[in-house]
């Protein structure tokens, strides 16, 4: 059995589509999935480089790569009753270092759900981590309500392009900040206003917003004082010391204006995303797709930081690879 692994931290070249890996056996609460595709997230790149501190990333080398997957259930544990062999599923592992980019993976059944009927496996694999992050940032951390305004900085990438659409699903008014070439793209996703960060950085906008979602943590909460006003909520995805401290305070009820989204894979939210997708309200955009054996090329694509939507790895037979 093959799996995408790395034996040392480093550049994309450390990735191996290695044969001879052990075939997993599902536990009583797990399903065994034949993986058709899995998307690459910025976290996968950071893990591969060994950037996370040991207090967060404790898994030893060599180890597997990948957090997102789509595929087919081929076996299930004896306590799993809501999924069956043959089901098409998508999901994300909550294991910090990932490891689901492999031919077969055993994963907790609660971390996958039936895949959207309207998507291919490659498209379905693009959804989980990025769309869950967008949903949980806006709905849970920010408490975004219909009619409220949200500023999304980094609106054209993986999490950002879902955030624009999720915000619209939640009934919010969206201002999207991105590069000049993506202005029309984010408007097509539903943003009422698109701003070129090359002309006006997000923290220099004159308006006030109910929520600022700073996808890449390009600034700090304090940089957005004007945009947040007195009651606005700032959310980002980057676990810097200051954001970890602020999130700890928020969870103790000591302040809710500076929030860090810590994504969690769960059946309820995956099912909600599936409903949005099959209703035509949410659509993943795939910017590049590569075979698992060409994972290094896919990782370099993500590292360019100029992706429009998501980059996906796939098994043979799932579609044409990006040249």
Image (tube, rainbow, N blue to C red):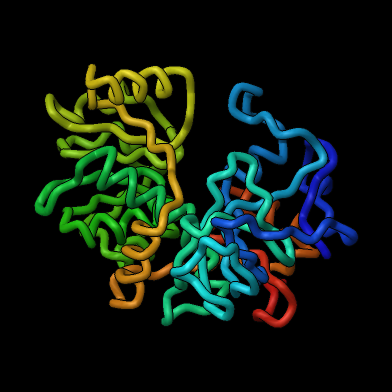
Q: Residue furthest right?
A: 20
**How many numbered discs, if any?**
0
Residue at (71%, 82%) from the top-left corner?
317
Residue 161 can be seen, yes or no:
yes
Q: Residue at x 67, y 29 (%)?
A: 58
Relative image position of residue 147 (x, y in whole percent) = 9, 52
**Figure quadrant of the N terminus:** bottom right
**Relative to 89, is 316 on the left or the right?**
right
Left or right, 269 with reference to 78: left
The extreme left residue here reads 147
Expressed as whole percent of the image width and height from the top left, the position of residue 279 reads: 28, 77
Between 198 and 61, the one nearer to me in the picture: 61
Q: Nearer the viewer, residue 150 or 94?
A: 94
On the rendered structure, is 9 left or right of 26? right
* Coordinates of residue 32 in the picture (x, y in percent): 64, 65
For image coordinates 41% across by 48% down, the residue present is 133
The quarter of the picture where residue 107 lies is: bottom right
Q: Nearer the viewer, residue 153 or 144?
A: 144
Q: Quadrant of residue 181?
A: bottom left
Question: Does the image show residue 309?
Answer: no
* x then y, percent, for residue 41: 57, 50
Which quarter shows the C terminus? bottom right
Above/below status of 112 relative to 217: below
Question: Where on the picture, by quarter, is residue 185?
Answer: bottom left
Say which residue appears at 53% left-offset and 77% top-offset.
Answer: 87
């Amino acid at each position: 059995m093959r799996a995408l692994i790395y034996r040392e931290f480093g550049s994309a070249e450390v990735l191996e589509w290695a044969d001879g890996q052990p075939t997993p056996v599902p536990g009583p609460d797990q399903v065994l999935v034949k993986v058709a595709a899995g998307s690459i997230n910025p976290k996968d790149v950071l893990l591969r480089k060994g950037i996370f501190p040991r207090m967060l990333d404790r898994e030893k080398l060599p180890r597997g790569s990948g957090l997102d997957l789509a595929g087919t259930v081929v076996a299930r544990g004896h306590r799993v009753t809501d999924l069956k062999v043959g089901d098409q599923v998508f999901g994300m592992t909550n294991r910090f270092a990932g490891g689901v980019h492999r031919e077969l993976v055993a994963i907790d059944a609660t971390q996958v759900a039936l895949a959207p009927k309207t998507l291919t496996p490659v498209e379905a694999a693009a959804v989980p981590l990025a769309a869950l992050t967008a949903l949980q940032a806006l709905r849970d951390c920010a408490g975004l309500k219909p009619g409220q305004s949200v500023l999304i900085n980094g609106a054209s990438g993986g999490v950002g392009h879902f955030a624009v659409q999720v915000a619209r699903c939640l009934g919010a008014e969206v201002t999207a900040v991105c590069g000049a070439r993506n202005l029309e793209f984010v408007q097509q996703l539903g943003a009422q206003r698109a701003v070129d960060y090359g002309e006006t950085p997000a923290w220099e906008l004159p308006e006030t917003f109910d929520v600022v979602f700073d996808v890449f943590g390009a600034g700090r909460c304090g940089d957005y004082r004007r945009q947040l006003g007195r009651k606005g909520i700032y959310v980002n995805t980057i676990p810097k010391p200051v954001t970890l401290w602020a999130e700890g305070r928020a969870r103790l009820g000591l302040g809710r204006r500076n929030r860090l989204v810590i994504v969690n894979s769960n059946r309820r939210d995956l099912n909600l995303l599936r409903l949005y997708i099959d209703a035509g309200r949410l659509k993943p955009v795939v910017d590049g797709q590569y075979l698992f054996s060409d994972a290094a090329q896919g990782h370099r694509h993500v590292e360019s930081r100029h992706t429009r939507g998501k980059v996906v790895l796939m098994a043979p037979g799932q579609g044409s690879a990006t040249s």
